[in-house]
Amino acid sequence: MIRFDQVCKRYPGGYEALKNVTFEIAEGEMVFLTGHSGAGKSTLLHLVAA
């Protein structure tokens, strides 16, 4: 299971890439991450992988 509860990510200089992200992914569940350029998709995936 992967669970985020009100996760935020702020880069140096004050840019807030993610704000209050909350979700839960159950074992075996498939999800898709979509969004426009700069929406925070890669940032979110980096946090999940950490």
Image: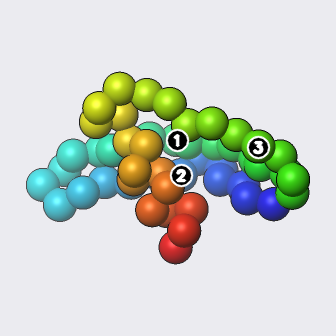
Check the picture and name the quadrant holding the N terminus: bottom right
The picture quadrant where one finds residue 41 is: top left
Q: Residue at x 52, y 73 (%)?
A: 50
The residue labelled by disc 2 is: 7
- Element class at badge 2: strand
**Which mark is first along the chain, 2 or 1?**
2
Q: Could you tell me how many numbered marks the image carries?
A: 3
Image side of residue 25 versus residue 23, left or right: right
- Verify CB contact (< 8 Å) between mark 1 and mark 3: no
In this orientation, does residue 4 appear? yes
Q: Residue at x 64, y 42 (%)?
A: 22
CA gap between label 3 and label 2 equals: 21 Å
Q: Residue at x 65, y 50 (%)?
A: 5
Residue mark closest to the camera, 1 vs 3: 3
The residue under label 2 is which amino acid type? Val
The residue labelled by disc 3 is: 30
Image side of residue 3 versus residue 46, left or right: right
- Verify CB contact (< 8 Å) between mark 1 and mark 2: yes
The residue under label 3 is which amino acid type? Met
In this orientation, does residue 18 appear? no
**Which of 37 and 14 lies nearest the eye of the viewer?**
37
CA gap between label 1 and label 3 equals: 22 Å
Image location of residue 32, percent across then percent down? 63, 36
The residue labelled by disc 1 is: 20
| Image height of 46 relative to 21, above or below | below
